[in-house]
Amino acid sequence: MARVVIIGGGWAGCAAAITARKAGAEVVVLEKTDLLLGLGNVGGIMRNNGRFTAAEEIIALGAGELLAITDQVTRHKNINFPGHKHAFLYDVTKVEPLVRKKLAEMQVMVELETRAINVQKEGSWLKSIVLANGSAVEGDVFIETTGSTGPMGNCLRYGNGCSMCILRCPSYGPRVSISQRAGVEDLLGQRGDESYGAYSGSCKLAKNSLSKEIVEKLDREGVVIVPVPTEDVNVKKLAYKVCQQYALKEFAENIILLDTGYAKLMTSYYPLAKLREIPGFEFARYDDPYSGGKGNSIRYLSMAPRNNALKVEGLSNLLCAGEKAGLFVGHTEAIATGSLAGHNSVRLYLGMPLLELPRALALGDLIAFANEKIKTPEGLKNRYTFSGGQYFKQMIAQGLYTTDVETVKLRVERIGLTNIFAEKFL
Amino acid sequence: MKISDCIDAGTEYCPCSLAETGECIMCSQLQGKVFCDCTNWKGVCIYQEYIWNHSQRKENRQVYRCRISAKEAVSPAVTVFTIQVKRTLARELKEPGAYVFLRIPDYPTFFDLPMSIMSADERAGVIKIAVQERGVKTKYLLQREAGRREEQQREEVLLRGPYWNGILGLKYLKSFQKGKALVVVRGIGQAPALPVAKKLLQGGNEVEVLLDRGRIAVDFTGDLFRKMGCRVLEKQLLKREDLTITEETLAYLQDSLLNKGVGLIYGGGSDLLHQGLSRLIQEVERGAFFVCSNNAQLCCGEGICGSCQTRLADGSRVKRCKTQLAALNIYEGR
Ligand SMILES: Cc1cc2nc3c(=O)[nH]c(=O)nc-3n(C[C@H](O)[C@H](O)[C@H](O)COP(=O)(O)OP(=O)(O)OC[C@H]3O[C@@H](n4cnc5c(N)ncnc54)[C@H](O)[C@@H]3O)c2cc1C
Ligand code: FES
């Protein structure tokens, strides 16, 4: 039986676990913290702009489990905010236990508080993953989904220091790039000014630290927009952000709050004292990152070079997905790439040709587009997401963007890939 | 798997000069790279400590002027010093593997002599160190150079410390519990084995000591081991001709590993003894842990002078004064 070892239990890792399991593998997920979902515990925005199309493609391809969960715990449907249409906001305080339960039902083995630090390999084949406690986890095929956030040294060198984000490096130890350990050099994302990495683009305020009016409006409408005092407008900060889909002028001039269980504040960081000068924010405090008044996590310093089937170049049995696989931003992007990597892990085990999604689908197009771009200096400064920026424009231009569920189903059916991720090989 | 940690990582002496020169043993950011590659996390970010310390190393270890309250010649070759130190220092030196640098006042720093701690009493603020007369530095420390008379004996010593890397494989020693352990010691190696036995006993282990008087021809620790609760067997460990382990001892060790369930062996002797022990443990293949004294030529203890540098089987070089390795890594392939 194929044994697939997944390193990193974020959205990408969980999605990979599901499709690898469906294809018939025995699956182990190694996660350094005590929570699955990684950054998925602090995000929440789904189905905005092109992510709607992408979500429906994932479902039509046969990997709808995780989307069923996010849809189930959605607090607000079809909300609009500057630059973004028909967003769904899942409740980040409800989603993780449901994903954990789903993986348990599917008999995926999840090892929490288990940090991978190295590999053992023979030639170009990985044999096992070495854990921080010195033991080794053997496997036939490996999928790296360790994301690209932090760790502390990177957040310090390229940011304002550890801001105490959900990954909690001081408690669980730093992220380690497994592909780099296996001898494949990482690609580093850049900012407009060519320094490396980028700040995460949002922080979370404790909802009940805000005024009653704000909380009521958030509960009712999902969005609250408050103008920033003009002397505090900082347009420059936008260039440092990961989430270029939210790097719009409106986001510098306004405080945009979204209701994800927390009040999600759509800016990288905002000095607490300044924030508290704004009416309704007098008692504001951060819940994520805890030091959101000072900085945010730094991302995109550890992408592996890979092909469009998500196999890491130079290694025979390592696949990758999520932020590890390119300058991707987003839960939907992580689930999309994770699902493909999980499916391909079993094909790789069996010596079958790996699946590349055609560019007639938004998923296939994004994966190929990001891979073309990452090879150019300019491309390293961009991020790629269905929800905005350069790629959403391309999606519209290619006629890929649609909110019609039936159209998506038909497209997937026409290329003969309906339910491909549900296929069992073993 | 090769473990290589820095013994000082995360202590008040970290980051050190090696961070300032891009030679940190642990941190990729402090090795001239531009990203984290943190495989040996010790609970603190060394790069962060460094930046927060204004991109400077922490203060170096201090040199203390200490009184020698007793010198006991246990044999013509071996003298046990009792030295008075601050209680904090005594507490820091209670760990197995602890050592200090000693030197008679008014002598230049190249007389600094690394000396393992035999015992440390934090309440009384004293440490004991056994000194075997060997070369230039030990002779000066024992004040046996030509022309020095008995009444000129100095009662003070300069002490630099604390240092901790006197034992390789510390993590096995510290985590081994409720098992059976063998402490195999020869000659002056008896002294630093006392804190080792103590640690093993604290872990609820049964401890047997195989003791060879060796070149110093004295058993000055047997009673101390017994008092702690160890079983002590005097044995000739090495053959006179080629200093390899005797057949009788090999057979005894083999039986201990195979039939008596010994799960950890500590070697406190020469490299030849350690080599023999490590080979045996690997041949027997029962997964027993090997821990041993760090026999490197220590000189500065700070990773600066390079005198302790050793090449491992995989071609990498390690500074053994600061690098905490599994003992098998040192002796494999030799
Ligand atoms: C504050 C914030 C808000 C966001 N909001 C949204 C949003 O609203 N909508 C949206 O679509 N996207 C959002 N994003 C982006 C999105 O969350 C990420 O792009 C996506 O979740 C990445 O998933 P991933 O699985 O690739 O990586 P991660 O979520 O980073 O998962 C990686 C996992 O690997 C683990 N790991 C790392 N190293 C090791 C190791 N050595 N051993 C074992 N485990 C290891 C980590 O602990 C982590 O759980 C947000 C991001 C942030 C930071
Ligand atoms: S003793 Fe000087 S470098 Fe190790």
Image: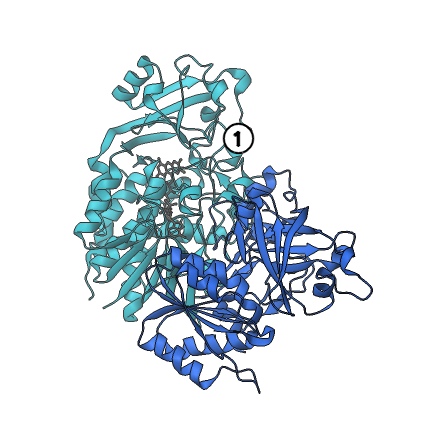
Q: Is residue B152 above or below residue A38?
A: below
- Quarter holding the N terminus of chain B is bottom left
The chain drawn in blue is B
Task: Inspect this view and state whether residue A409 appears.
Answer: no
Q: Secondary structure at mark 1?
A: helix
Q: Quadrant of residue A169?
A: top left
Q: Position of residue B302 (x, y in %)?
A: 64, 55
Task: Inspect this view and state whether residue B1 appears.
Answer: yes
Q: Position of residue B158 (x, y in %)?
A: 70, 51
Which tint was used for chain A?
A: cyan
Q: Which residue type carries mark 1?
A: Lys
- Quarter holding the C terminus of chain B is bottom right
Q: Residue at x 28, y 65 (%)?
A: A347
**Is A382 or A115 nearer to us in this picture?**
A115
Q: Residue at x 44, y 44 (%)?
A: A149
Chain of the residue under label 1: A
Q: Is residue B39 above or below residue A74?
A: below
**Is B328 or B80 nearer to us in this picture?**
B80
Q: Position of residue A201 (x, y in %)?
A: 44, 34
Q: Residue at x 66, y 46 (%)?
A: B60
The residue singled out by tag 1 in the image is A237
Left or right of A229 in this view: A348: left
Q: How is the image coloured?
A: by chain
Q: Residue furthest right?
A: B147
**Is B234 or A267 nearer to us in this picture?**
B234
Q: Residue furthest left?
A: A105
Q: Position of residue A306 (x, y in %)?
A: 43, 59
